[in-house]
Image (cartoon, rainbow, N blue to C red):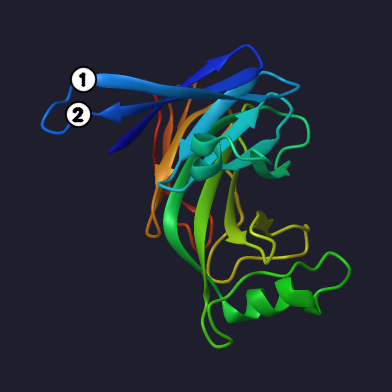
Amino acid sequence: MIGITIFPINVRLTFHFVSLRRGTTSSYFPRHTTTIPTKYPLTSLATTPTLVYVGNTEGEIFIAKVEQLDLKLEPIVSATFKPFQSSPVTALHAVVGGTLSSKVREAANGSEGEDSIEVFADGEDNDTSTTVLLAGSEAGEVKQYEILPTQGGNFTHWPRLKNQKLKKRAHVFLGNYDKIIKITGDHSKIITACEDGSIRFYNPRDGKVRRSGERR
């Protein structure tokens, strides 16, 4: 069994791969360390069994494959995009098991103009397996993306343009007015916690606040 210990240090992200002894919870045996150099300080992190998502102070998100990090394969970073133009990414949460609708998949394959992408699908009639990525910013912005595999073995995000939408799910969530310090949820709900002490529950389909709690 393999575990990952992640150390954000200055502007470099260090992945410390360890082997876990079966039957114990306290014995760790270092295997090796992999470091991703980045230009700006890192601010947030989310992981799935196969991918690592990292945000920085410039509003950028980096996507890296755990396998490439573990084996030190190049390129270390599989994709980069910028959900927030002028605010650091302060919270990330990844949910495995989203499905890209056929309508969006067709758009991603070229029916929406020059920014089209070619996504990978197991079959012509099958939806593409994706990950839902939730991102929060220092300015209180919250956005939801689909992370999908491309033909070249890398990854990309959807929506890519302002006029593109997720089917049956909201892309932007409003109502937070301070730094997002934590974001979590699944396909039925999204929960945000702000630095001002407020907590909000969102409907992931329409982006509206179901209920909220303010610090008194």
Q: Mark number for residue 212?
A: none
Residue placed most toward the observer, 118 or 59: 118
Examine the image and state in which quarter residue 139 appears.
top right
Where does label 1 land, which residue? Answer: 27
Examine the image and state in which quarter residue 152 appears.
bottom right
Task: Evaluate whether residue 137 shows in this view.
Answer: no
Residue placed most toward the observer, 187 or 53: 53
Residue 134: where, in percent of width, then height?
53, 46
Q: Crowding near pointer 2: few (<14 within 10 Å), some, many (20+)?
A: few
Mark 2 or mark 1: whose residue is earlier in sequence:
2
Residue shown at 27% from the left, 20% from the top: 28
Question: What residue occupies the far bottom of the structure in this picture?
Answer: 125
Residue shown at 58% from the left, 58% from the top: 146
In this rendering, is residue 33 above or below 105?
above
- Residue at disc 2, secondary structure: loop
- Which quadrant does the N terminus fall into? top left
Residue 30: where, in percent of width, then height?
36, 20
In this rendering, is residue 12 above or below 103?
above
Q: Three-letter amino acid code at disc 1?
A: Ser
Residue placed most toward the observer, 183 or 127: 127
Q: Crowding near pointer 1: few (<14 within 10 Å), some, many (20+)?
A: few
Where does label 2 land, which residue? Answer: 21
- Which quadrant does the C terminus fall into? top left
Residue 101: where, in percent of width, then height?
56, 76
In this rendering, is residue 67 above or below 115?
above
In this rendering, is residue 189 above or below 91?
below
Alpha carbon distance from label 2 to label 1: 6 Å
Question: What residue occupies the far top of the structure in this picture?
Answer: 10
Residue 169: where, in percent of width, then height?
53, 64
- Residue at disc 1, secondary structure: loop
Q: Three-letter amino acid code at disc 2?
A: Arg
Q: Are marks 2 and 1 in contact (CB under 8 Å)?
A: yes
